[in-house]
Image (cartoon, rainbow, N blue to C red):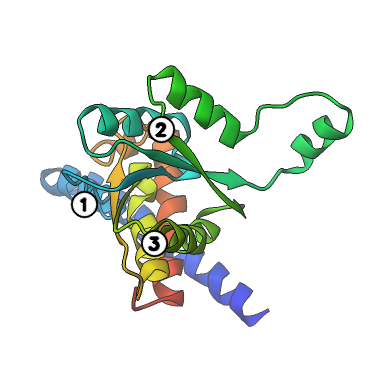
Amino acid sequence: MIQTMTNSRLRRGITLVLVLLAVASIAVPAVRHSILRAAGRTLVVNECTELADIIVISGEADGAGVLKASDLVHSGVATRVAVFTYAPNAMEQEFTRRGIPYEDRTARFVRQLRSLGLVNVKQIPTYVTGTEDEGPALARWCDEQEFHSVVVVGNPDHSRRLRRVFHRSLKGHETTVAVCSTPYSGFDPDRWWNSHTGIRTEIMESEKLLLDIVRHPIS
């Protein structure tokens, strides 16, 4: 209960800060873009490396992540790509119950990667439901496969929090991880304030990032 109240107050505080930044940027045109651009870039990291043992697509990146993973393979960063196995949701379970085939997110990623010419596609067997599950699942799997370097592809608005989660999970392991932002996402850190979707994404991801920092100050 206390944690829920704390999170709620923090979310309201983050929203207020972003609103004040937007108001300040309008009031002072000379610094408008620099303030808003800095807020957008706070969410983003892009650590694409020259070589890695394998490329892993984070679920939130969806098709934009598939496209970036394909680019990385074709540019020689790695020859293998892995996708997570996602726990079936209520809708998918109902399709299965009715005996109707349903292409879940994992199957769709694999099909899209192969359509893009990638033949060495692996599936991380542990069920995950979101980002927080992906970190520990990847750490265990990399230990089993003896991978030493991994590139994780994510959306730019999610990438800084993604890096925190994976660095935290892989701490003490022999695998190093780099987070690479896909350019095919709809979020533009330099112009996010120009659309309702961009504003909503900035607010939501800022809340999630700051909550992660509060919960895990050292990551």
Secondary structure of the residue carrying tag 2 is: loop
Q: Mark 2 points at which residue?
A: 120
Instruction: Residue 76: give its label.
Output: none
For disc 1, the marked residue is 38
Disc nearer the start of the sequence (1/3): 1
Q: In this view, does 136 lie above or below 205?
A: below
x then y, percent, for residue 24: 25, 53
Q: How many numbered tags mark residues here?
A: 3
Distance CA(mark 3)–CA(mark 2): 23 Å
- Mark 1 vs mark 2: in front: 2
**Residue positioned most to the bottom:** 2
- Give, as a three-letter code, the residue at label 1: Ala
Q: Name the residue under label 3.
A: 166
Q: Which residue lies furthest to the left in this view?
A: 30
Query: Residue, x 44% and y 42% (percent of image)?
Result: 82
Q: Which residue is drawn at 34% across and 78% down?
A: 218
